Image (cartoon, helix red, strand yellow):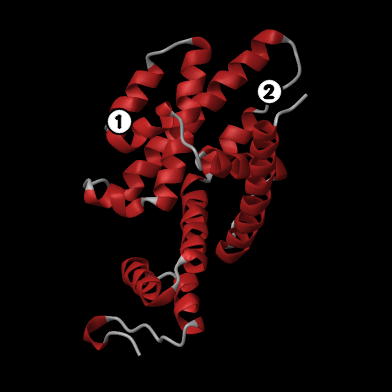
C-alpha cells in the first residue's frame, strides 16, 4: 500500500512530465527543430530529472568538462555508459539553461556543444557494439546518435524553453527587469513578447525601455 508521500511524489513526477512535454513541444516549434518521438520523450524525462539533479550531474557545474569527458572515456562497461550519458545530459541542460554561467567561466558554446556531442556519441558507440555482440534486439543507439548529431539545435530549444519559463514566472516590476536584462543578453523573441505583453518595448543601446 502506498503512503501519502509516495502518492505525492508520483503525482509530482506526472505533473512535471506533462508540463515539460507541453513546454518542449512549443519550443521545438518555435525553433523549427525536429525530434523523433523517442528523443522527444527522452528530452522530457531529462528536463524532469534536472528539476532535482543528482551528484554526477552537479559535477558539470563545478568541474572542467574536458576532465569529466576524459574520466568517462577511461572507464569501462556500464559505468562508462552511465557517465557518458549523464555528461551529455548535463551539458545539454546547462547549455540551454545556464549559458551565461558557462560564458562567465570563459567557455564557448561551440566547445561545450562539441563535448556534449562526443559524450552522446560515445554512448551510442557502446550500444552499437553491444547490439553486434549480443544477437538480441536493438538497444536504440539511434537515440543517442540523434542527440549527438543535433546537440546544438537541442541546446537552443532548451534555451528557448528556459526563456519561456522565465517569462511565465517573473512577476511585478522586478520580474520585468529580470526579463529585460535577460533579453539584453540573448535577444530572445520569447522574452521580447513577454515584455510587449507587459506594455514594454525593449530597445538596445542607451534608449532603455519604453
- Badge 1: how crowded within 10 Å, few (<14), some, or many (20+)? few
Name the spot of residue 179 as percent of width and height, x first. 39, 70
Name the spot of residue 193 as percent of width and height, x first. 50, 78
Residues 81 and 50: in front is 50
**Residue at 47% across / 73% down in the picture?**
189
- Residue at mark 1: 66
In the picture, measured across the screen, residue 11 lies left or right of residue 61, that is right
In the picture, measured across the screen, residue 164 lies left or right of residue 110, that is right
Name the spot of residue 76 as percent of width and height, x first. 46, 10
Helix or strand or loop: what does disc 2 sit on? Answer: loop
Helix or strand or loop: what does disc 1 sit on? Answer: helix
**Residue at 41% across / 86% down in the picture?**
200
**Reading the chain from its start, which is encountered first: label 1 or label 2?**
1
- Badge 2: how crowded within 10 Å, few (<14), some, or many (20+)? few
* 150 lies above or below 54: below
**Residue at 52% across / 50% down in the picture?**
154
Quarter containing the N terminus: top right
Name the spot of residue 100 as percent of width and height, x first. 31, 54
Amino acid at each position: 500500500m502506498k503512503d501519502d508521500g509516495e502518492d505525492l511524489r508520483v503525482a509530482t513526477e506526472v505533473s512535471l512530465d506533462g508540463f515539460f512535454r507541453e513546454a518542449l513541444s512549443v519550443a521545438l516549434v518555435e525553433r523549427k527543430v525536429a525530434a523523433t518521438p523517442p528523443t522527444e520523450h527522452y528530452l522530457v524525462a531529462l528536463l524532469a530529472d534536472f528539476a532535482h539533479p543528482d551528484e554526477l550531474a552537479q559535477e558539470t557545474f563545478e568541474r572542467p568538462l574536458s576532465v569529466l569527458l576524459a574520466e568517462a572515456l577511461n572507464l569501462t562497461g556500464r559505468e562508462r555508459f552511465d557517465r557518458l550519458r549523464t555528461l551529455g545530459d548535463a551539458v545539454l541542460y546547462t547549455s540551454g539553461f545556464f549559458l551565461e554561467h558557462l560564458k562567465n567561466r570563459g567557455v564557448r558554446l561551440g566547445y561545450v556543444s562539441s563535448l556534449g556531442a562526443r559524450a552522446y556519441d560515445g554512448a551510442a558507440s557502446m550500444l552499437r557494439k553491444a547490439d553486434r555482440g549480443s544477437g538480441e534486439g536493438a538497444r536504440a543507439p539511434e537515440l543517442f546518435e540523434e542527440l549527438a548529431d543535433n546537440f546544438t539545435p537541442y541546446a537552443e530549444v532548451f534555451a528557448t524553453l528556459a526563456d519561456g519559463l522565465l517569462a511565465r514566472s517573473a512577476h511585478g516590476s522586478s520580474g520585468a527587469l529580470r526579463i529585460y536584462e535577460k533579453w539584453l543578453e540573448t535577444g530572445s523573441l520569447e522574452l521580447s513578447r513577454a515584455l510587449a505583453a507587459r506594455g514594454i518595448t525593449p530597445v538596445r543601446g542607451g534608449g532603455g525601455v519604453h
